[in-house]
Amino acid sequence: MTWPPLLRLQEALGPDSELVIVGGAVRDELLGRNHADWDLATRLLPQAVMAKARTAGLKVIPTGLQHGTVTVILEDRPVEVTTFRSDGDYLDGRRPETVRLGVGLAEDLSRRDFTINAMALPVGGGDLVDPFGGRADLKAGWIRAVGDPLQRFAEDGLRPLRACRFAAQLGFEVEAATRSAIAERLDVARKVAVERVFTELDKLLRGSEPQRGLALLAESGLLDLWLPELRPMVGCGQNRHHAYNVWRHTMEVVCFAPPEPAQRWAALLHDAGKPGARSVGADGEIHFHGHEARSLELAEGIFDRLKASHTLRKAILALIRHHGVHPTTAWGEAACRRFLGRIEADGLGLAPWAAFRLADLRAKGLDWEASQAEHAALMARLEGLLAAKPPLTVRELALDGAALMKLAGRSGGPWLGALQKRLLEVVLDDPAANTPDRLADFVRRDPAGH
Ligand code: ATP
Ligand code: MG
């Protein structure tokens, strides 16, 4: 269980280096999960690691010498090698004031967050070093703090969120004392930088069992620190179209949506506006009129606070914006093309829209077989229409802006956009009308243009 190029590093550093694989790589190897990087640790000081690795012809980058970390490039992959270290006092709930190098492996492992992350595997061969029962916890599916969880969560406020994230990624339970310590250390968790919070939430959402992480966030109160807008969803009852309340439905959509950032974030936020839009009609039926617009507003606020990237935001908002439109096979061709044009103009492809729609339908918890069949029929129809490559947006009109200005004998202005919109309506109704001649005819006869 290791990656052969690591042996080359072991050879370069020598037998006294006590080079071990640590942290997430050990955990994921034992679970047979893929992992992006190898984290290594050694008793050698960073200067010695650099010198020995360079002597052996390896490329080395001094990435974080003050923390004991150098990066060695092995077969074009960066591998972090960190000197065994212990953490000094945590004063701000975020990072240790100092780190001390030159300690033993046992001390290095004891500063790590959870037992499943506090194991080491010697690169040169030998037994797993597992002082806190990490292997047993891996087998049992437990996330358990190393040492006293109240103290560990007081040191670093990110750890409680990491516990929720690992529960979602690995499908594990958080052990009782660790779990109850989360709620008692919210004052420390509150101090964590939003960029780190966003990264953890993103990993949580993309996990294989995100509902575990989300349930923990709601139960512990972490939800109220970073996503307070979502609290009203918990317990918010729905109507006969749904088997579950809004929060439970949301957790189900997150699970069923493809594990990609835009899909999972959109799933989390798509119905956030429902509690605020809830009304009871004269017939006693519950409605959520206009909830998409409210969800969009809440999502914007959340992305501002968590500093989400522009590209991701745009993709998430497009999914939320169009989730409430439910085309059916009863729609006419022109209406279907209008729908396809609207999502395309918003940068949303039919496939991601459909994947999200399917997750949303499935998470209603009702009539899944019938919904699936209906959805398949709808997709056959929409894909059939797309296959004919009809013009769907202004950009695809057979006459571009310059040609229209020439034809109308006018320079650019708001009239041009308005005319393009009218032309688009014409070709959405009848794609065959999208020829220069027919569009020119229309412009000449267009009453609004004169
Ligand atoms: P992944 O890389 O899959 O996100 P990981 O467990 O490898 O998970 P990293 O952030 O790469 O997480 O950290 C590597 C190791 O460093 C962890 O396994 C853990 O041993 C330790 N570690 C990371 N963050 C903390 C923390 N906040 N407190 C204590 N130990 C930590
Ligand atoms: Mg890692």
Image (tube, rainbow, N blue to C red):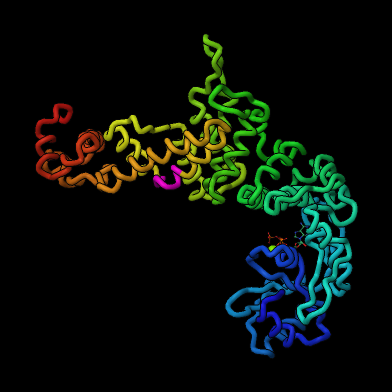
Report whether residue 292 is seen. Answer: yes
Rendered view: 302 above or below 132 = above
Rendered view: 119 above or below 304 = below
* Residue at 51% from the left image edge and 34% from the top image edge: 296
Taking the image as shown, residue 393 lies to the left or right of residue 222, namely left
Rendered view: 398 above or below 120 = above
Taking the image as shown, residue 393 lies to the left or right of residue 294, namely left
* Residue at 77% from the left image edge and 38% from the top image edge: 220
Q: Where residue 209 sits in the image (x, y, percent)?
A: 66, 47
Q: Where residue 268 sits in the image (x, y, percent)?
A: 59, 39
The C terminus lies in which quarter of the figure?
top left
Q: Where residue 145 sits in the image (x, y, percent)?
A: 84, 53
**Residue 54: quadrant of the picture:** bottom right
- Which residues are the magenta region? 348-354
The N terminus lies in which quarter of the figure?
bottom right
Q: Residue furthest top?
A: 282
Is 434 magenta? The answer is: no
Q: Where residue 82 sits in the image (x, y, percent)?
A: 76, 72
Q: Nearer the viewer, residue 203 or 29?
A: 29
Q: How many marks?
A: 0
Instruction: Report the magenta stretch's main SS.
Output: helix
Q: Indicate which quadrant contains ligand 2.
A: bottom right
Q: Nearer the viewer, residue 168 or 374?
A: 374
Report whether residue 414 is seen. Answer: no
**Residue 328: quadrant of the picture:** top left
* Residue at 83% from the left image edge and 49% from the top image edge: 153
* Residue at 84% from the left image edge and 49% from the top image edge: 154
Taking the image as shown, residue 58 lies to the left or right of residue 181, namely left
